[in-house]
Amino acid sequence: MPTPNAQGLSAVSIPLLSAIVGGVLALLLLADYFRRRKLAEVSADHNKRHHPLDVNTLKGHVDAVTALCFSSDGRYLATTSLDGIVRIFTVDDPCSKSFKILRINLPAGAHPHGIAFSEGASSLVVAAQILSGSSLYMYGDVILKPAGDCNKQQAKVPAPEIKWEHHKIHGMRSVLTLVGVPATYGTGDGSVIIASCSEGTDIKLWHGKNGKELATIDTNQLKNNMATISPNGRFLAAAAFTADVKVWEIIYSKDGSVKEVLKVMMLKGHKSAVTCLCFTPSSEQIITASKDGTIRLWNINVRYHLDEDPKTLKLFKIPLKDAKGRTSLYERMSISPDGKILAVTSGPILQWLCAESGEVLDTADKSHEDDISGIAWAPQMIPMGNTQAAVLASAGLDKKVKLWLAPGSHHS
């Protein structure tokens, strides 16, 4: 027979135990509620941030992606990262869930900052910074029908070999931009000309296949921002510390080799430093963006040897504003192969403008989770399902590479 104390304890324990169990259940239900709510908020935020032109994200790099470029046929996309690895993606369909890739490990301690295809898509030139200064490496046979995809380990793929290399090409200064184009103008023999632009004032031209140094140009403008070559290999233009843009002509000999590089014109009109520029597909016009808050379209198809000056064809105000209403700076630009759409970047913002009117076609405010480090249009339309698509690639310090459709395109 239970004692009075035991009966009292039992009478108290049952309600207390019930209260404890009820409290625990309530806490579990509450925790589950907040977990579901958090997941819903994250999902809603993801959907909100997913831009309709964003068709794919190429992952694999484990550090900031520093540069990217397409092959001339648009089928291959090469990327470099501070992880010391080059990845070459086969872009058969930009919406694909997996891509064939070829991985190249750069020499130990090399931090790449630029990349350019040479001789079509058979070789690749990489600019990297090492302890002794800036270097160039040319890898041959980079398209070898790689096996696997970006989610699988590569198996028995022969590593491309370095065919030529140069060191201390700009002393201790790093390479800001690296670009390669085939020399098709005049007596050019179609060989790829590589331009490396340093953070100082020097720019060097190289023969893409044999690595021969062809010319050294001094901009004499305190500090370079970038440099590029016209699509036909005729002109070289540099954006630097000053408001003026210098343009040189690459003169070819009868045998197709580079004879000399002559300064032929100056683009005068901006009131502050030019931050970025690009040639139009015709090689007869240049688009520039400046810290003065404007974009200019220049006609360089002039008789400069008769002292005819290049002229501003169009002048637009940069439409992008920051949170305080101040005009933002464009840091990179790339024009679509048809010359109709100008892609520009500012920090993590990616914007598409009408090249004819300067009108904003679309904006991705958070295209990457960190600043954009490079953009490039595929030179050719890329198959996507049953259609062909104009594709833009962007690289970010967030370790990601993204593929975008042109405004006006749709995908399911």
Image (tube, helix red, strand yellow):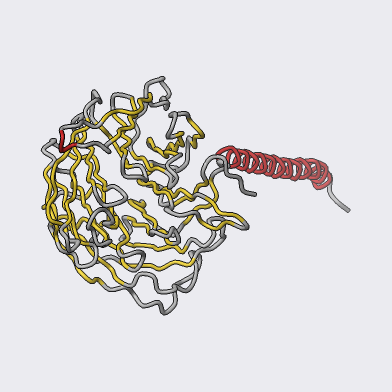
Q: Is residue 271 placed above or below 82 in the rendered structure?
A: above
Q: Position of residue 261 (x, y in %)?
A: 14, 49
Residue drawn at point x = 13 percent, y = 35 percent: 221
| Residue farthest to the bottom, as pictured | 156
Q: Is residue 77 placed above or below 303 in the rendered structure?
A: below
Report whether 230 appears left or right of 222.
right
Which is more toward the observer, 7 or 26?
26
- Image-quadrant location for residue 161: bottom left
Can residue 113 be seen from the camera position used here? no
Which is more toward the observer, 377 or 65?
377
- Image-quadrant location for residue 225: top left
Report whether 136 appears left or right of 82.
left
Report whether 36 appears left or right of 134.
right
- Image-quadrant location for residue 129: bottom left
Give the number of marks: 0
Residue drawn at point x = 13 percent, y = 52 percent: 170
Residue drawn at point x = 57 percent, y = 40 percent: 408
Q: Position of residue 146 (x, y in %)?
A: 44, 72
Q: Is residue 47 placed above or below 159 in the rendered structure?
A: above
Which is more toward the observer, 283 or 394?
283
